[in-house]
Structures are given as structure tokens and as C-alpha cells.
């Protein structure tokens, strides 16, 4: 951390604060208020610096408004880099002491679309040189010469969030003067220094009157956030009461050393009037990171001049030309590579075209076969699923089943007629049969005049999705073999072998337990009677050139009058001979 010294003086006393600084971090190591008496400022400062060992230290000097001239300026909206020239031009016309040799700096207070408002300050070369000579005589290096009220306000604004829509008044009471600063939304909008009477009784009343006049002068709406008085409450108790009555808002005391870190020894030796040191603490806090909040006559805001580089012209001309040439070469190389890539792809496409055409024809033939096979519904499996999911016989009976295949679109429809004891049983029956592969629709429950408990008749249509049939077929084709293909029926479980064998022999595959009314008119389920499929419901396949020889036994001959499962084999041969005629739908009817 760099050690710095902030100093300030007036006609009666010299004030100084020394601290270790790094950014906004400030640690105060020394603070003093030294009366001048009959000794000059330069001699007093030199003795104090030598006694405290502060030689060859960077000095930050705060000056009062009496040594500089302040004005409020309004300029048209211009960019920030043009403001320094416009402020200097306007200062020559507005300031009495601002000549060509005066130093002018400014602080922007408000910027709108209509213009820029600012506080401008000017100091003559005589006063500025005098300050430098005093510091050089005390072996100090002058780094800043800033306005005292703005330095104190910078300390407050750095450590406090701005209030929205309300003004904040900062008051610093010096030996003979009072500096009043009004801040709005984080910016200083008004600065005023007034002479105060020497008597304590008249001091508070005069301060309250100056506060009211300052608020009127800056155009404040009267809505104050707070009034801050730098110092200690034990020293300014009377001033606090007067300011509260004059402003009508809260008034608080603020010790500037509470906003920074203070060495333990220095904290015990702080002077009584700590509020007079607020500008010096603010200079140290804002020196490195918040210098834009200060008006600095040693480092005024100036127009940034760009030094032209001798290589700038070469770069401005050579770089675009090189970029164009490089881009042209890159585009040419890329286009050449793309042409070669196109030629390679065309040659590969030509070689693959015959294979693609053959594959497309094979896919088309396979799709026709798949569409035809999608109508080959395994009705035995569907009836088995129906028997598994049907409600108990004391709640629902089936009186008739018919199955219809659709060879053109695939899939099929299973129509179930029956009766139930309650409409809720029918709904339960529909939900049990409905899944992703089966769509169940019915005509609702209709009440019938009957003497038994099955008073509600129904007709349900179960539509099998052809995509499910195709997926099931492909799954069977891709499934790994589980044993000898010729002995599948022999290795099947005993409980499932009988239905499969019956279906192959054309026996009772489509049958269900027969429901017969007894002598009393009630339906009873037969123990072992099964109704075979009606052979007239499926059309017999016409003769075909591809039919097996006479000496070979066909499935229909082996199973008697029972047609093959789904009847799809007969339909396929009939469709091949009929040509453009519509393929008849396969129907299987089972009556109970």
C-alpha cells in the first residue's frame, strides 16, 4: 500500500490526514488539526511534516471555493470527448478569472437528451503556483489539487447507495465557513460555501437559514432523504436541532473516520472537530478508483489526442489487400475441393444405382407380401386372449363370435355378441380387451326382456391393428430358435399342445363353451361340448396351378371340413387367379 498525505488549510488552521492507500481501501495512520497563529502556512506545514516523518510523500491538496471560481454550465448534447473543449470555450465567456492561462475542470451533474448540466471550476496560475510552492517547501510532491466540498461528497457517495427521487444534503462546518453540497441520485447537483457567524447561538440559526436558501437555489422539490452533518454529535448537538427544524427531515451525524480503517493509536488521538477532516479522507478514498468524482486542477479533463502511428497508413492499405488476396485464395481452394468432391460423389452414385434399383424392386415386392400377410390373423390366439380376459360366467355370457380378415388393408375384426348382468360388466369387458394393438368399440348395452339375470345385451367389435400383426411376425422371424423345428409340437407344454393340435387338424379351434338354456329358461355352460367353426363361413380355395399334387394331403383334407386358420391360404390362390377382382375377406363364425 502506498502512503499518501491529504492537506488543507485556511486562515486559522492547518489540517492533514496521512494514510496507506490501495484502491478504495484506506487505513489512516495520522490525523491532526494544527492552529496557524502568527506562523505562515508554509512554515507550519514544514515543521509538522518534519516532526511526523512525512517527507517525500505524495500530497493531495484540498482547497476551498475562495481560491477557485465556480459556475453552473449548460451545454448542448455532445460526446464526452468533445466536452473539455466546449467547457474551456464557455469558461472564457462566463468566468471572470478564466483566461488562456487558467486551469478549468468540470463535473457533470446531469445528462439528458436536451443537454448536459455541469459544475465548472477555474483557478488562476497565481493561486495554483502558490500551492505548489508551499508543498515543495515541505518536501512534498503535489499530485492533486481538488475542490474541498466535492472531495467530502465523494467520500459519502462512495460508501452509500443513492436514494431514488430524493435529495441528500451534506454539510461540513469549518472554523469560519460552512460548505453545503446537494446530491441527487448519486450525483452532486449543487455546491455552496457560506460564511458563518462566530457565536455558537447564532451559528445554528444561520445554518438553518442557509440550508433553506440552498434548497431553493438548486431547485429541490423539498423531498429530502436526509441531511448529513460531518462531525460528532457531542460537538454539534445544537446544530442538529436547528437543521431538523429547518429541513423537516431526519438529520444525522457522520464521522468520516467511520467509513475507513483507522490505526488504533490514531483513533485515540483524533481531534475534536473530525468533520473538518472529511474532505481529506474523501481525497484519499477517491484518489485511485473514483477520481471522476473530483474536480482536479492538476489533472483536468482534457480531450484525448490520438497520436498517429507511422505504420497506420501501411496497415490501413496493406491489411485489407492481404485479406482480400487471402480470402480469394481460400475461396478458390475450397471451390476446387468441392468440385472434386462432387465428381467423386457422382461416380459413386452411378456405381450404386443398379444396386439401389434392385433393392427398391425387392422392397416393393416385400411390401406387397407384407400387406397380404398382415391379413393373416391368428384367430386361435385372439380367441384364447378373449377367453382369458372375459369376466366370469355369472356376470357375462357370449352367444356368438364372428371373425373377419381384411387381406387388402391387413388386420381383422372380431365381433362378439353376448349378454351381461350389469352395464358396468360390459365396460369392464371392453377395458380388459383394449390395448395398443386392439381397438374395442361397441353399440352400448341394450336391455332385453328375459327371465334370467343376463338382461343387458351387447355387441362388441374388436379391431386388430395390422401393424401389430406385422411386428409379431417379424419378431417371430428374428427370434432365436428354441429347439428342433420338426419337433415343436412335441416339445410344447402339455397344456398348450391340445389347442394347437386341434387347430392344425381343423377340430375345435374356434369353439367356445356352448351356452344352452335349461328347462327353466336359464343359460348353462356345457362341460365339454364345443361347436366347430362353420365351414360355409370360409370360401374354399379354387383350383390353382401351384396347388400340391393329388397324392399329397392338403391341410383341408387332413382337417375335414375345418378351414385353415384365418383362411388366408385359400384366399391367396383365389386372388392370383381372379386378377383384378377384389379379394374376399376371410370370415370365421362361432355360434354358441
Image: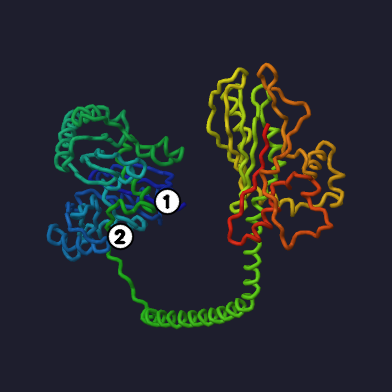
Q: Nearer the viewer, residue 378 or 242?
A: 378
Would residue 172 be visible to someone looking at this image? no
Indicate the quadrant where residue 349 lies.
bottom right
The residue indicated by pointer 1 is: 23
The residue indicated by pointer 2 is: 299
Residue occupying the point 30% across, 69% down = 305
Would residue 465 be visible to someone looking at this image? yes
Residue occupying the point 42% across, 51% down = 23
Query: How many other residues sit within 10 Å of disc 2, few (<14), some (14-19) or many (≥20)?
Result: some
Q: Earlier in the sequence, mark 1 or mark 2?
A: 1
**Which structural element holds mark 1?**
loop
**Left or right of 404: which side holds 507?**
right
**Which structural element holds mark 2?**
loop
Q: Vertically, is 353 above or below 73?
A: below
Position of residue 517 measured from the top left corner of the image (x, y, whole percent) = 68, 22
Position of residue 158 measured from the top left corner of the image (x, y, whole percent) = 35, 45
Report the Cα–Cα distance between label 1 and label 2: 18 Å
Q: Which coloring applies here? A: rainbow
**Left or right of 183: which side holds 572?**
right
**Left or right of 468: which side holds 296?**
left
Amino acid at each position: 500500500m502506498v502512503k499518501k498525505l491529504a492537506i488543507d488549510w485556511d486562515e486559522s488552521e492547518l489540517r492533514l490526514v496521512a494514510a496507506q492507500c490501495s484502491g478504495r481501501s484506506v487505513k489512516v495512520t495520522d490525523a491532526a488539526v494544527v492552529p496557524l497563529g502568527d506562523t505562515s502556512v508554509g512554515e507550519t506545514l514544514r515543521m509538522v511534516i518534519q516532526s511526523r516523518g512525512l517527507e517525500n510523500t505524495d500530497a493531495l491538496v484540498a482547497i476551498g471555493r475562495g481560491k477557485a471560481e465556480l459556475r453552473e454550465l449548460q451545454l448542448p448534447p455532445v460526446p464526452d470527448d468533445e466536452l473539455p473543449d466546449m467547457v474551456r470555450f464557455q469558461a472564457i465567456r462566463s468566468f471572470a478569472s478564466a483566461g488562456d492561462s487558467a486551469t478549468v475542470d468540470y463535473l457533470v451533474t446531469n445528462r439528458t437528451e436536451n443537454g448536459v448540466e455541469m459544475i465548472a471550476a477555474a483557478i488562476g496560475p497565481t493561486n495554483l503556483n502558490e500551492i505548489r510552492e508551499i508543498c515543495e517547501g515541505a518536501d512534498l510532491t503535489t499530485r492533486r489539487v481538488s475542490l474541498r466540498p466535492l472531495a467530502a461528497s465523494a467520500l459519502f457517495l462512495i460508501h452509500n447507495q443513492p436514494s431514488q427521487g430524493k435529495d441528500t444534503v451534506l454539510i461540513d462546518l469549518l472554523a469560519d465557513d460552512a460548505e453545503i453540497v446537494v446530491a441527487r441520485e448519486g450525483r452532486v447537483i449543487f455546491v455552496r460555501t457560506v460564511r458563518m457567524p462566530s457565536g455558537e447561538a447564532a451559528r445554528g440559526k444561520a445554518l438553518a437559514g442557509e440550508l433553506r436558501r440552498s434548497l431553493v437555489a438548486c431547485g429541490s422539490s423539498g423531498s429530502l432523504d436526509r441531511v448529513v452533518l460531518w462531525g460528532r454529535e457531542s460537538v454539534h448537538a445544537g446544530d442538529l436541532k436547528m437543521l431538523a427544524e429547518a429541513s423537516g427531515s431526519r438529520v444525522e451525524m457522520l464521522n468520516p473516520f467511520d467509513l475507513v480503517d483507522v490505526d488504533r493509536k490514531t483513533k485515540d488521538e483524533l481531534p475534536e472537530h473530525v468533520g473538518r477532516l472529511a474532505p481529506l479522507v474523501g481525497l484519499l478514498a477517491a484518489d485511485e478508483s473514483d477520481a471522476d468524482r473530483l474536480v482536479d486542477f492538476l489533472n483536468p479533463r482534457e480531450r484525448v489526442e490520438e497520436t498517429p502511428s507511422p505504420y497506420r497508413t501501411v496497415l490501413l492499405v496493406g491489411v485489407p489487400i492481404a485479406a482480400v488476396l487471402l480470402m480469394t485464395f481460400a475461396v478458390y481452394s475450397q471451390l476446387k475441393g468441392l468440385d472434386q468432391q462432387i465428381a467423386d460423389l457422382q461416380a459413386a452414385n452411378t456405381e450404386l444405382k443398379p444396386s439401389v434399383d434392385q433393392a427398391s424392386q425387392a422392397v416393393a415386392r416385400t411390401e406387397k407380401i407384407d400387406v397380404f400377410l398382415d391379413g393373416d390373423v391368428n384367430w386361435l390366439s385372439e380367441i384364447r386372449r378373449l377367453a382369458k380376459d372375459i369376466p366370469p360366467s355369472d356376470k357375462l355370457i357370449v352367444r356368438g363370435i364372428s371373425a373377419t380378415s381384411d387381406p387388402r388393408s391387413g388386420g381383422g375384426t372380431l365381433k362378439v355378441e353376448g349378454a351381461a348382468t350389469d352395464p358396468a360388466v360390459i365396460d369392464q369387458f371392453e377395458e380388459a380387451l383394449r390395448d395398443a394393438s386392439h381397438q374395442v368399440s361397441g353399440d352400448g348395452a341394450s336391455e332385453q326382456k328375459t327371465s334370467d339375470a343376463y338382461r343387458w345385451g351387447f355387441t362388441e367389435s374388436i379391431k386388430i391393428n395390422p401393424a401389430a400383426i406385422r411386428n409379431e411376425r417379424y419378431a417371430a422371424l428374428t427370434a432365436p430358435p428354441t429347439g428342433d423345428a420338426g419337433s415343436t409340437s412335441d416339445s410344447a407344454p402339455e397344456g398348450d399342445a391340445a389347442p394347437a393340435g386341434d387347430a392344425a387338424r381343423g377340430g375345435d379351434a374356434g369353439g367356445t363353451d356352448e351356452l344352452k338354456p335349461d328347462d327353466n329358461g336359464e343359460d348353462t355352460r356345457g362341460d365339454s361340448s364345443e361347436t366347430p367353426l362353420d365351414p360355409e363361413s370360409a370360401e374354399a380355395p379354387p383350383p390353382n396351378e401351384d396347388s400340391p399334387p393329388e397324392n399329397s394331403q392338403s391341410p383341408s383334407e387332413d382337417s375335414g371340413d375345418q378351414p385353415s386358420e384365418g383362411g388366408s391360404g385359400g384366399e391367396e390362390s383365389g386372388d392370383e387367379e381372379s386378377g383384378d377382382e377384389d379379394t374376399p375377406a376371410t370370415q370365421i363364425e362361432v355360434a354358441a
